[in-house]
Image (cartoon, rainbow, N blue to C red):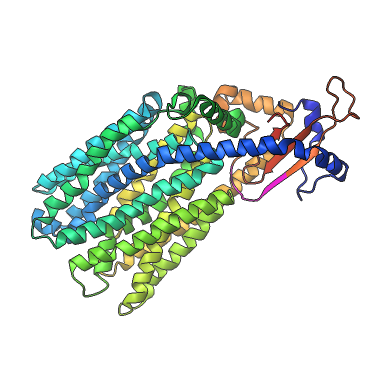
Amino acid sequence: MPANNDTKEEVTTHENGVVPSTTTQAMKDVESMGDAKSTVSQHDEKKLLRKLDLRLLPILCGLYLLGYLDRSNIGNAKLGGLLTDLNLTTDQFQWCLSIFYFGYVIFDIPSNIIMKRWRPSFWLATLTFTWGIVAMCMAAVKDFAGLLVCRLMLGILEAGFFPGVLFFLSIWYKRREYGRRVSYFWSFSSLAGAFGGLIAYGIAKIPTHILNTLFIIEGAPSVVLALFAAWYLPNNPETAKFLSTDERELEVSRLATDQGPANDHSWSWPRAVSVFTDYKTYTFMFIYITGTSALQGVTLFLPSIISGMGQWDRAASQALTTPPYFLAFILTNVAGWSSDRFFDRAYHMVGINLIGMAGFLMLMFIPEGQVGVRYFAACVCTVAVYANVPVKVAWFNNNFAGLTRRALASAAIVAIGTIGGAIGGQIYFDEPLYFGGNTIAFCCLGAQTIADLGLRFMLARENKRRDKLTQEQKEYEIFKHGGEELAGDRHPDFRYKESWTTWVYKTAIHAAADSDDMSKEGIVVAVVVNASDGTETVMDDDQ
């Protein structure tokens, strides 16, 4: 049961995490009482998490891998003779790369609104089925106009999938669990790059038309898996048939506890509009644009970058794209695990960016003849631009509370941020060494790093401001934002995620069971103060 107001006054925050000496013995006396129950609860929650992971992640990762194959295979097709077959100029090819992301911008937000108000399983499956059809239709393209239209349609259809899954995962996992799952999901995009290079290498050895074969082989699985996903994916924890009644209750309860006062599942247009009056939305958009510019530049031109390093043939260049992507797959998951383990986002992004900037500097200034070092630098750049993504995605999803605000913020940030993909399709213009493209990518990561640190400072300052609010000031804050239902992450009791150290301590509170006599032995209240988001969870032995 929640602690009353008198109890809260007794629970004090100690910055060094040391338990007051007057409470130590009381803690020892009662600590064993909750051990058995705590063990059972932790066991049940771990069992539930394993069940969620096995049900949700494999199918979502499979769909995303196929989608990323369908969008990025155009880079492999270029080495397979796409420009010659369709009589494309370099400028026309770059526009075919960039037009995909205009489709993203157009349909991202509408797609998440549809998903929020419809069945996620059907909507995600519909998107996958239709983009698979369009991907296969690219095999029949004969000219620039046809390829441009197909790429635009592919962007429109894939637009809703990534932000949709980000929102979908947020309704199943707590904030501290979220980053690791997003990392695992996103890492399959780099795995798609590895598979794409191997598939293109294999097709290049077959005496047939590589363009037609590549698009059909990589598009057809999306259609098949989409039909299975429509039946297999659940829609929300409240109606999940693969969970028992007790498991559903545990899932709903733990998510509500994690969100605290910002927990709300209802739809509201005022709440939706509030996303666009929040400075965090635009800061995260800038962070996303700069990261995506470097990411998509590397993704779309990695085969060409590697091809310009040595004297190997096109098939070998395709195969050599596999190791960088495979390393990115591994280290993206490591970054996600570490980010959740230390409950940190900003500093992880800064560290990853510095590694990527070092890689781009090597590509810019290492002599052309040192092929091994330049290839290593390409691997470093690929790892960094991919490992960056799930950390920033977890960061902005953690810091928008209430399902409506989170769904709209996720879609808006990804939609506008994906403009970086259009930029990335244009920056690698100076083959074969791409000094200009690598310089632009380096500057993008530098600008993102500055924005990361600036936002972290702003969130930390806001947390400290909320810590100092009186009850009257808190009530005014709630009123200013339209009441409890509309406040979301702007609620004065919500704390933003911005740092990483966690302190856990217990304070014994003596309260009479049926009187106010504080000298009698009563309950033990555990207060978990998380320095990364500032939240305080007050629990008694019933929790």
The relative height of residue 519 versus residue 67 in the rendered view (above or below) is above
- Front residue of 193/249: it is 249
Q: Return the x and y of residue 393 as percentages of the image width and height.
A: 46, 45
* Magenta segment main secondary structure: loop
The relative height of residue 90 versus residue 247 in the rendered view (above or below) is below
Among the 4 quarters of the image, the one containing residue 61: top left
Query: Magenta span covers which residues?
Result: 497-504
Q: In which quarter of the image is the C terminus?
A: top right
Query: Number of numbered discs present?
Result: 0
Among the 4 quarters of the image, the one containing residue 378: bottom left
Q: Return the x and y of residue 221 as percentages of the image width and height.
A: 23, 43
- Front residue of 328/453: it is 328
The relative height of residue 28 versus residue 335 in the rendered view (above or below) is above
Q: In which quarter of the image is the N terminus?
A: top right
The residue lying at 33 percent from left, 34 percent from top is 124
Q: Return the x and y of residue 501 as percentages of the image width and height.
A: 65, 51
